[in-house]
Amino acid sequence: MAEYFLELKGVTKTFPGVKALQDVSLAIRPGTVHALMGENGAGKSTLMKCLFGIYKMDSGEIRIEGKKVNINNPEDAMHKGIAMVHQELQPVLPRNVAENMYLGRFPTMLGPLKVINHKKMYEDTAHWLKEVGMEIDPKTPLSKLSIGQMQTIEIAKAVSHNAKVIIFDEPTSSLSEKEVEVLFRIMNDLRDRGVAMIYISHKMDEIKKISDDITIMRDGTYVGTWKADDITTDEIISKMVGRELTSVYPEHNDEPGDVVLECKGLTSIHDNSFRDCSFTVRKGEIVGFGGLVGAQRTELMEAIFGMRGIKSGEIFVKGKKVKTGTPRRAMNAGMGLITEDRRGNGILGCLSIKDNTSVSVYKKYLMAGFVLDHGKINKVVADSIKKLSIKTPSSREAIANLSGGNQQKVIIARWLANDPDILIMDEPTRGIDVGAKHEIYEIMTELARLGKAIIMISSEMAELIGMSDRLYVMCNGYIRGEITSKEEMTQEKIMSYATMF
Amino acid sequence: MKNSFSIRNPLKKGFSLKDFLINYGVIIVMIVLVVYTGINSPNFLSSNNIMNLMLNMSARLVIALGIAGCVITAGCDLSAGRMIGLGGCIAGILLQRADYVGKFKPDMEPMNILVALLIVMAITACFGAVTGFFIAFLNVPPFISTLAMMEIVYGANLIYTNATPLGGYTQEYTNLATDKFLGLPWLVWIAIIVAAVTWFIFNMTRHGKYMYAIGANPQAAEVAGVPVKLTMILIYAKAAAFYGLAGFMLGAKSGGASVNLGLGYEMEAIAACTIGGVSVTGGRGKVSSAVIGVCVFELLKAALQFLGVDANAQWIALGVIIYIAISLDIRKYVVKK
């Protein structure tokens, strides 16, 4: 038997303009847990998608038990003994455990009639559930189960496929401590039976506890593989972030003014979301929010902007307590929010640039109290197109026809027209090309100079350090650290706060 | 990146016959139909028939303009037909002649016509506001919310009128269909005024802009500070007021009303809107879309009659035209992947 059950060698994958993976290798020994680590965007997911045939790799090879194989799609991978437990589970909630386990491959009877053999399905399900140590009626609807239990069912499904490699993509991100224990028990059982596991996670203590080998990736490249006992947590962090910051960011050295926004002890109505978050933002200041994906930064900001429920805590704008509750009220309190999901809740796709820019400010441009003054609106829109250098043939063009960067500028123009005191920007440069990114940085700096308080969520280390005057780092719903001086903003420091689970 | 919203490539200039046919296909079909029918049966274009057609279109246009607001927000309104019935019956009861033998309320004097109209519209608007409340605050899908209201309104109308057919209206009321101002019957003027008011609401008020924003992307509209819930209630209340008005108009035209007045008109109105270019996926549609849609629909019905097409086969023709028109219309927005 080969030393490694699964090997990926020299995997390279480019997307237009980006080298996502460059000569990455990964070798998994049977009966081990292999941790795959790296920052957001290091290429872990891309590598797994190449393994499952979701992406076609430009070059490189996959070997199973030493033999070269081609994997064209996830089903193919399943047949070759590779299964995945996804970070975002996609169960069919109203249906029961057995139906979810056998979806797409129901056992049938009566030959060509293909009538579903319910008896066999339930018996088999019960068998596999027992294999992973879960005692539950196969007829229970999935909606009655906890996330941890659903995950166990995913694992049972993988085991029922006779999987030799199971990939866990951040499996503990939404589990309670007790559920994590159960998961680890199952993983240990699987290990004893010779199943190999790839474990993707950011949680250092878990990695140290469960894994045998650790492979670290950075910026789409392979950094190295170590035995878990031979490497310390600090070493892992420094190997994950060890890169030079190259981009240039506009200068911004003004002394910030009074506190404009103060939040005290904000706690979500949901258990696993943001908890006890307190922070302040001052006039003319750009405050960064760092953290790993899933740190609940977006949720916190959306709650402040009235889009999500808050169980306890207070929000003060310019010293006055406000209750936001709806975006409209947050807007009237002097806030603006540029959302992370531009297509989902940013742009009004089929409407014009003019409509997209002016939708929040009609109140300011009324004649006789109710008739829209299109002359004035046109002027404001034309001004912002010029000021933000939005590239478009005319203000009547549908926003969906613009590039990502120009769409983002229109959304910025929308909030500028509204003149908020506080502007929250959630991943303001996501999916935007380099040139437009720089323009957005310039706009942000200019706004800070004009006395706006700016909150920026960013998952890009370089951007976070380059743009922020001060920054908070969140992890697992808590604000874990505040870094007040530029000198102290190092990748290592941010990463250590971001992994304080 | 390609996206499915592209209407046209802004950088591409020049004339393309294919684009022209796709963009104006419906209007071309309408013109061809009118000319062909006009040649084959000259009566089709007689002033008498045209006047009749316009009377038919007037109430339909008012309904379509009401429903257009719902469709632009990616909704629909199945209660329109029953609301028309309710509006027609209330108007009829309020405006029966004092000396009419079968008078529903024998002791009541006929009301001032304008007051009666306002009462009708106010009542239907209240029902519409309830529909809107369920859609906006309780997240009931428009299809279901308006379906429920359709049943409720019908029931209310049956109880109220005892299913009695109404007639014997005051001269003043029925004159709306016959008396002319500047060569056009009053009913047609009402439709024109409603179209103008609707254009004003859609284009010159915050409410109209909010409606388009909600239709384009309700989540984004909410984040942008649009009062989504209030706007939705207003849209359905306003639409219902229009249905009430349409019922009032239909009563004037036929000189009577019953609980079944307007039955099924909501489907015709939705079809007319979409034929004219109101997108069922939301965010797109103008007053002119409703006008064109209603014209095409009514002209087609009349033309088929004049051409002697079997009355039963006409239904098939209507279905086919809906298929063709919508397939053409969708092509404007869907870019091949």
Image (tube, coloured by chain):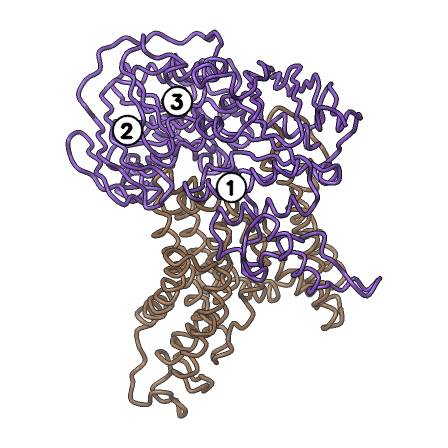
Q: Are marks 3 and 2 on the same chain?
A: yes
Give a yes or no on whether discs 1 and 3 share a subunit.
Answer: yes
Q: Amino acid at mark 2?
A: Pro
The residue to which callout 3 is attached is: A384
Residue, disc 2: A420
Q: Chain of mark 1?
A: A
Mark 1 element type: helix
Residues packed near mark 2 inside 10 Å, few (<14), some (14 to 19) or many (20 plus): some
Residue appearing at x 45%, y 73% in the figure = B252
Res. A51 visible in picture: yes
SS state under label 2: loop
**Image point (71%, 40%), residue name:** A78
Chain letter for the purple colouring in the rendering: A
Query: In the figure, A454 relative to B208: above or below?
Result: above
Alpha carbon distance from label 1 to label 3: 53 Å
Q: Position of residue A293 (x, y in %)?
A: 45, 30
- Position of B83 with respect to A45 (left or right) is left
What is the CA distance from the residue labelled 3 to the residue labelled 2? Answer: 15 Å
Q: Position of residue A367 (x, y in %)?
A: 28, 39
The x and y percentages for residue A348 are 47, 37
Along the line of sight, the residue nearer the viewer: B264 or A296: A296
Disc nearer the start of the sequence (1/3): 1
Whether the residues at callouts 1 and 2 have beta carbons within 8 Å, the answer is: no
- The residue lying at 69 percent from left, 30 percent from top is B15
Q: Which one is in front in this view, the residue at disc 3 or the one at disc 2?
A: 2
Q: Which of the two marks, 1 or 2, is nearer to us in this view?
A: 1
Label for residue A183? 1
Output the chain of dot 3. Answer: A
